[in-house]
Amino acid sequence: MGGLGLETGLSDGYSGLGLETGPIDGYGGFGWAPAAVRAKTGPSGVRSNVRGASMAVLNITLFGPPRAARDGVLVSFHRGQTLALLAYLAAADRPHSRDALATLLWSEQAEQPAHAALRRILYDLGRTVGKEWLEIEDHHVALPARPGLHVDVRCFCTLQARVSTHGHAPYGLCDDCLPALSEAASLYQDDFLAGFSLKSSTQFDAWLTLTTESLRLELAAALEKLAGALFARRRYDLALPHARRWLALDPLHEPSHRLLMQLYAMNGDQAAVVRQYKQCIRLLATELGIQPSPETIDLYHKLASNQRVLQVEGV
């Protein structure tokens, strides 16, 4: 996803929809927080204590190559297991048993040496990112949510979950959920832990594969909702980047081709409608040896005859 060159953050077209954006401690640091929280921060978005000193901040980025920064300074990891453990703990705000962590990271080793290796990596992780961020007990380990901790994946999942709790009609998003879901999509800068693997542990790599695919599906659902909701609002210019990203996730996905064709038509770009349809035909023929579905063919003929399609059909 990182090389798509598409901007999906909030733009002027979202002004007045009820959410402000900017970095806020405790809410991911990636541009979204409730207004009640924002009111308690200074102009820079960073909380201060009563004496005016900024609190400690730990930023963890898991979309794309994993990295961490303490108070704005990038942290260097000298062991792959240390970075892998941080990523696993940061991905979800819950405790993990020592047995599960030892098995995850050293699946090929016996129990005793695996637990000994876990103790060493926990010590290394505490030295690297600061032991104050970790919750280490006799039987479990966690990276609990607290002020100053920012994890992009957690923020992405929180925003997605919040939007899903609202009752919306198909391709309908309320004025709160539209910018929140756009912010979630903008957090996804690249695939989960892109370029990282732990060759010494098949279990970690299996977890990484499953998590990556799950998050890609979440992104696809978000982009579909955004593009459809903006289409329904007749904000075709704002819908286009989301529709293009949606298609880029799976170039053989006909519904995203159809939505792009409709958006180009509503923007009066008939040449782009034809290009999109031809691209769909070419990809399906080359990769799958099939023709477009009747829905896609029928839609193209409607658009080609200048019939403005006002509803998203078959997406």
Image (spheres, helix red, strand yellow):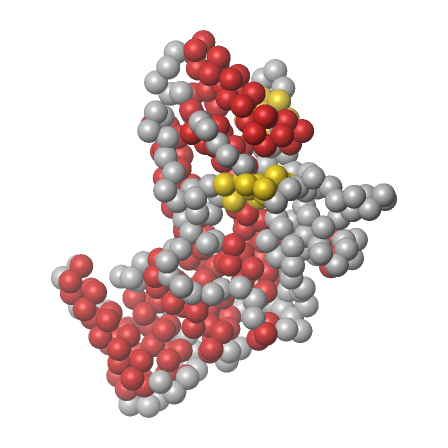
- Foreground of the two, 202 or 225: 202
Residue 32's place in the image compared with 292, above or below, is: above
Residue at image point 58% right, 17% down:
139
Counting from the top left corner in percent of width and height, residue 163 is at: 58, 57
Q: Quadrant of residue 256?
A: bottom left
Counting from the top left corner in percent of width and height, residue 134 is at: 62, 28
- Foreground of the two, 60 or 180: 60
Residue 232's place in the image compared with 74, above or below, is: below
Q: Is residue 247 left or right of residue 224?
A: left
The answer to whether residue 232 is seen in the rendering is: no
Q: Quadrant of residue 74?
A: top right
Residue at image point 40% right, 20% down:
106
Q: Quadrant of the N terminus?
A: bottom left
- Foreground of the two, 229 or 50: 50
Residue 237's place in the image compared with 164, above or below, is: below
Q: Quadrant of the C terminus?
A: bottom left
Q: Is residue 94 left or right of residue 295?
A: right
